[in-house]
Structure formats: structure tokens, C-alpha cells
């Protein structure tokens, strides 16, 4: 789907004052719902109950795999409305069970102290090949249905600096990756939606950072992976139709889990606009 279709797909139907219903696009054709979609829709649900404040952080847990064939119910708890900060908790429900929950904090716009690190060096986005083109080349001899999957419209344009990880023939790499990304088509003028689409995209490659040193991928027999939690801090407003550098590192993997950190910088001026952290399941099961 293209970006406009994604924006439409993420929209929610209000069922009650604090109750919303969301759906998954038929174009996704996944066995389970992509985690970034649930993050984005839960953030949108929270925004539906907040006025004149902007999200500065969110923290969420993935509890059960989402079923793309049925709607998701989002139940918003209006935890607190303070003088400067507003707190919301959102529970996503399918088949009568929680599949996901999110806590988010919103703040009145405020001036204050500022500092940030310099944007790490990376080859320019215009010198890096589009990930979809890399995949098309690798799958040139693949069955038609696999190639058709790559030909569908993509809402997020991604360019991995050292080349997209080859899931069919993975080799160990440093637990660090840099990805240029942006929304492919115009999002619009609503700054909240730029946050929402960035949150959607932030889950696309982060977990893979902790997998890189181990020479495995989701296609490796016996390998199991899934996002367990996801946190995001929004430092500065930004236009996600512009190119951004997603600098990702994995400082640790242990206990069947991989830990990942991400920093999102705007290409045009090097401003750090958001930071992410995620822990994911990384487990090898015995192949029967």
C-alpha cells in the first residue's frame, strides 16, 4: 500500500467516548499484524482524547500476536490531565484478550535547555540503493508470488547503508545498522500524523540489529523472533516526508532476548528528532 492508503488504514472508528476500532489493510497479507501498525493506531487512539498537546514519549508491550483478519478494539484510559502533562494508557483487544498495551505522555509546547550529539556519519541517502530494489535483484529467480509481494506499493522508503540483510543467506555482521527512511508519499500537514507514521516505521528494522552478529534470519530453520516491547521519545517536530537517518545499535543479547537502541536524525540539518529502544525475542528451537 502507498502512504495515503496507510494513513487511511490507520484511521479509527469511534465506538464510545474512549473506545475505538481499527482494522488491518487487506494488502498486508501477513500471518500476524505488523507491530508498528498497532503502535501507530494506539497512539492515534490516545490522540483522539488529547487536545493541544504533543506526545513526547510512549512505552508499549506486545502481549499476543495480532490477528489481521479481525478488527482491533482500542480502549483508552484517561489516566491524568495535568497542567503541563497528559497521560494516557491504551489497551488493544482482539478475541476478548489484550494483544498490546501502550502508555503515552503528552506535553504542552515548552521552551527549555537543548543539547544533542552530532548526527553519526553515513553515506548520503542518494548514494544508497533502495531496499526494495536490492530485494528484487536477489529474488529475480524466485516464484512469481514472491516477486509480486515486492511490486506492491510501499508506504515507507528505506535504504540500508551496508545493504539490506540477506535473509536467505545471512552472514554475521556488526550489531549496528544505519537506514535512511521516509514516508514515500505526502502525509499532509497534521504534525501528529507525522509522529504516527514515524512510529509505524520505527519498528521496521530495529529488532534485526540484535540478530546481525549471529548469522541468522527469520528464514533460518528453528529461529524464532518477535518484538516484546517498544519505547519511543519524540524530541523535535519533523516532516517525515523528508529523509531521516535511523542509526541503530544492539549493545546486548542474552537470555533469549536482544536489546536495541535507535536514534532518528533529520538529514537536512542533523537534528535528533526521536529515540527508540526495543527488546525482542531471539531464540533457536530444535528443528524436528
Image (spheres, rainbow, N blue to C red):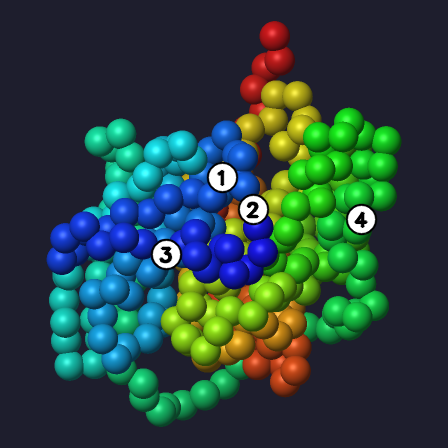
For the residues labelled 2 and 1, the Cα–Cα distance comes to: 25 Å
SS assignment at label 3: loop
Q: CA distance from mark 4 to mark 3?
A: 31 Å
Residue mark closest to the camera, 2 vs 1: 1
Q: Secondary structure at mark 1?
A: loop
Q: Distance between the Cα atoms at labels 4 and 1? A: 25 Å
Is the C-beta separation of discs 4 and 1 under 8 Å?
A: no
Q: From where the camera sits, is residue 251 visible?
A: no
Query: Which tag is nearer the camera, tag 4 or tag 2?
Result: 4
Query: Label 3 near label 4: C-beta < 8 Å?
Result: no
Q: Is residue 22 above or below residue 96?
A: below
The residue depicted at 22 percent of the width and 61 percent of the height is 88
Residue under pointer 2: 207
Q: Is residue 231 left or right of residue 82?
A: right
Disc marking residue 236? none
How many residues crowd around disc 4 within 10 Å: few (fewer than 14), some, or many (20 or more)? some
Nearer-the-camera pick, 11 or 181 = 11
Query: Which is in the foreground here, disc 3 or disc 2?
Result: 3
Label at residue 134: 4
Mark 1–mark 3 Cα distance, whole angstroms, equals 15 Å
The residue mark sitting in front, 4 or 3, is: 3
Q: Are marks 4 and 2 in contact (CB under 8 Å)?
A: no
Left or right side of 183 for 41? left
- Residue on which disc 1 sits: 26
Residue 11 is tagged as 3
Amino acid at each position: 500500500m502507498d502512504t495515503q492508503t496507510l494513513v487511511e488504514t490507520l484511521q479509527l472508528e469511534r465506538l464510545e467516548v474512549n473506545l475505538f476500532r481499527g482494522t488491518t489493510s487487506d494488502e498486508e497479507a501477513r500471518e500476524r499484524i505488523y507491530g508498528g501498525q498497532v503502535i501507530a493506531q494506539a497512539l492515534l487512539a490516545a490522540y483522539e482524547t488529547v487536545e493541544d498537546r504533543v506526545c513526547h514519549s510512549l512505552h508499549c508491550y506486545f502481549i499476543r500476536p495480532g490477528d489481521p483478519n479481525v478488527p482491533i478494539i482500542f480502549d483508552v484510559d484517561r489516566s491524568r490531565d495535568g497542567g503541563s502533562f497528559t497521560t494516557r494508557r491504551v489497551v488493544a483487544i482482539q478475541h476478548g484478550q489484550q494483544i498490546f498495551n501502550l502508555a503515552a505522555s503528552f506535553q504542552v509546547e515548552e521552551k527549555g535547555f537543548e543539547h544533542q550529539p552530532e548526527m553519526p556519519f553515513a553515506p548520503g541517502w542518494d548514494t544508497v540503493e533502495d531496499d526494495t530494489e536490492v530485494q528484487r535483484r536477489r529474488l529475480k529467480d524466485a516464484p512469481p508470488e514472491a516477486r509480486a509481494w515486492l511490486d506492491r506499493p510501499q508506504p515507507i522508503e528505506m535504504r540500508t547503508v551496508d545493504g539490506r540483510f540477506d535473509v536467505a543467506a545471512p552472514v554475521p555482521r556488526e550489531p549496528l545498522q544505519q537506514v535512511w527512511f521516509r514516508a514515500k508519499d505526502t502525509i499532509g500537514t497534521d504534525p501528529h500524523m507525522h509522529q504516527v507514521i514515524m512510529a509505524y516505521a520505527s519498528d521496521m528494522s530495529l529488532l534485526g540489529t540484535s540478530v546481525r552478529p549471529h548469522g541468522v534470519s527469520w528464514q533460518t530453520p528453528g529461529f524464532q523472533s518477535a518484538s516484546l516491547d517498544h519505547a519511543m521519545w519524540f524530541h523535535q517536530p519533523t516532516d517525515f516526508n523528508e529523509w531521516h537517518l535511523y542509526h541503530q545499535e544492539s549493545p546486548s543479547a542474552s537470555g533469549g532476548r536482544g536489546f536495541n537502541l535507535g536514534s532518528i536524525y533529520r538529514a537536512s540539518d542533523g537534528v535528533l528528532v526521536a529515540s527508540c529502544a526495543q527488546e525482542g525475542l531471539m531464540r533457536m528451537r530444535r528443528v524436528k
